[in-house]
Amino acid sequence: MDYAVIRVGNKQHRVRDGETLVVDRLHTDAGGTFEPDVLLGEDGVKVTVKVLAHERGPKIRIGKYRKRTGYKRHNGFRAATSRIEITIGDGSKREAAAKAKTEATEARAEAAAVEAAATKAAEVEAAEVEAAGEEAPDAPETPAGLPEGYAEMTVTEIEEAAKEWERPGVEAALAYEQANAARKGAVSALESAAGLPDGYTSMTVAEISKSAKEWERAEVEAALAYEHEHAARKGAISALDHALATEEEEA
């Protein structure tokens, strides 16, 4: 049996080891102990009561009134109480329970610390693996025949040098610009060097079909060569072939 029934101040209380109660004021001084009457408990069980402090209960307001007489009285009352602590037997069970609770708390704290350390180590390892697995960005694809040092050249340098490049080099540089840099000044200079109509590489098939009739034969041939080697747009090739055929008929 882990509880007992005792009599304190002419009242019965069901108590457990280590429990604290607030009872009517006792004559025992604060810090003193006594053994109350045990009404129910294990055979030969010893219950010790320790007075922790003498206190006062909450204040209760009491009012008295008498009608038509003007009689009014107000009084306050605070019950005198004592706070006691119960010890059943020698208190070994309570000490053992407290020790077990402390050990359990320490074990949980240690397990949490180990888990946190493992989680942190896993995060660090994952970060290292991710950092190691990151691949460097792929370098821009270099078309065959691209002039040496082209990628580091400025637009002005391209405009000056493109006039001296052979046609394969100009077309390779134009393909590089379209795939990577897309510098409008460089594209325009390369188109001019390749004999292409101005802005040809950015034209749609419909725009090519409409404009090809007005181009010079050399421009049409250059555009046709460009389409065969790079873009390969069937509609553009058809429009350019038609423009050449029309020009030959007119000639």
Image (cartoon, helix red, strand yellow):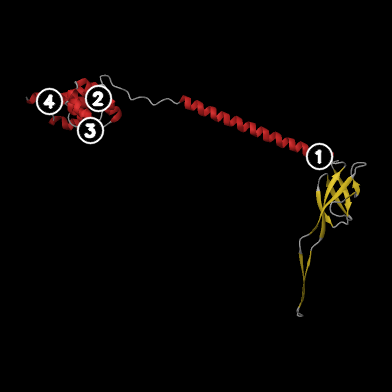
Mark closer to the chain start, 3 or 4: 3
Q: Position of residue 29 (x, y in %)?
A: 86, 55
Front: mark 3 or 4: 3
Tag 2 near tag 4, CB within 8 Å: no
Tag 2 near tag 1, CB within 8 Å: no
Mark closer to the chain start, 1 or 3: 1
The kind of residue tagged 4 is Arg
Q: Secondary structure at mark 1?
A: helix
Tag 3 near tag 4, CB within 8 Å: no
Mark closer to the chain start, 1 or 4: 1
Task: Give neighbour class at mark 4: few <14, some 14-19, many 20+ (Cα, 10 Å).
Answer: some
Q: Quadrant of residue 213?
A: top left
Mark sitting on residue 173: 2
Q: CA distance from mark 1 to mark 4?
A: 107 Å
Front: mark 1 or 4: 1
Q: Position of residue 160 (x, y in %)?
A: 19, 28
Q: The C terminus is located in which quarter?
A: top left
Tag 2 near tag 3, CB within 8 Å: no
Q: Which residue is mark 4?
A: 217
Mark sitting on residue 95: 1
Q: Secondary structure at mark 4?
A: helix
Q: Is residue 226 in sight in this rendering?
A: yes
Q: Is residue 203 in sight in this rendering?
A: no
Mark closer to the chain start, 2 or 1: 1
Residue 245 shown left or right of residue 16 in the figure: left
Q: Secondary structure at mark 3?
A: helix
